[in-house]
Image: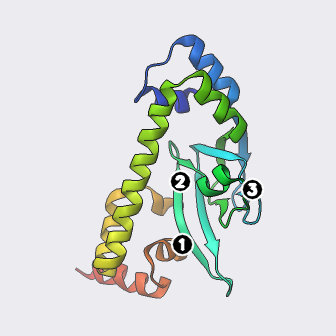
Amino acid sequence: MNTASIINSISKHVSLTSKEVLYLSSLFLPSKVHQGEFAEKAGEISKGMLYVNSGCLMSYFSDKQGNDHVIQFATAGWWTGDLHSLTRQIPSIYTTKALAESEVFLLPSNNMDKLLEMLPTLEHYFRILFQNSLVTHQHRLMLAFSATAEERYNDFEEKYPALEQYVPLKYIASYLGMTPEFLSKIRRRRMER
């Protein structure tokens, strides 16, 4: 699997020498995750951060009643992983599965530590990544508290227009905090306009 996509993504934020690119590329473990397969499972300690090279992953947690609550979608160019599990080395509460045939790169936690030690400039890259993630999650929380269901769906469509090709309606509804039936009503009303 070619690491060009992940190297390009990182190079948008930090400059890397050709030697650093070779070292960085050697730390990633490529993997294919078939549609419906799990990249990580709840109850296991997270192995590292996942970079989606192609396809689509979904992270969710299951409540005591067995309902799945979608936390994140990750498509090509996105990172995903349970930082709490990874940093504390405790079992994850999240499951991550492929919604489409996917190619991912795993950056194992021990390799990430080596990477940041050897290439401190990458701390800058990951800081930007984590800041952007925090801003996105804060925005999502703000919408959950203050926006109507239709406004939340409009925001989702505006930010993630390509996701609907991968993601079944029930998962989008879960991500937005509504039932699939209610989301269907919103979509019907919109088409009638």
Amino acid residing under circle 2? Ala
Mark found first going from the N terminus, 2 or 3: 3
Q: Quadrant of residue 190?
A: bottom left
Give the CA distance from mark 1 to mark 3.
Answer: 24 Å
Q: Amino acid at mark 1?
A: Tyr
Question: Which corner quadrant of the image does residue 15 belong to?
Answer: top left
Q: Residues within 10 Å of mark 3 (few under 14, many from 20)?
A: some
- Tell me, yes or no, if residue 160 can be seen here: no
Q: Residues within 10 Å of mark 2 (few under 14, many from 20)?
A: many
Q: Is residue 192 above or below residue 95?
A: below
Q: What residue sits 73% from the left and 41% below the top?
A: 31
The residue at 75%/56% (across/down) is 45
Q: Is residue 167 above or below residue 101?
A: below
**Numbered mark located on residue 157 in the image:** none
| Left or right relative to 144: residue 83 | right
- Can I make out residue 50 in this image? yes
Of residue 9 and residue 137, the one placed in the foreground of this image is: 137
Q: Earlier in the sequence, mark 2 or mark 1?
A: 2
In the picture, the disc for residue 171 is: 1
Badge 3 amino acid: Ile
- Give x and y (percent) for residue 36: 71, 62
Question: Image height check: is 47 above or below 155?
Answer: above
Q: Is residue 145 left or right of residue 57?
A: left
Front in this rendered view, residue 66 or 88: 88
Specify the farthest residue to the front: 88
Q: State the CA–CA distance, disc 2 to disc 3.
A: 20 Å
Q: Which residue is at 50% across, 32% downward?
A: 123
Lower position in the chain sequence, tag 1 or tag 3: 3
Residue 26 rendering spot, x and y as whole percentages: 69, 24
* Residue 45 disc label: 3
Give the labeled residue for mark 2: 74
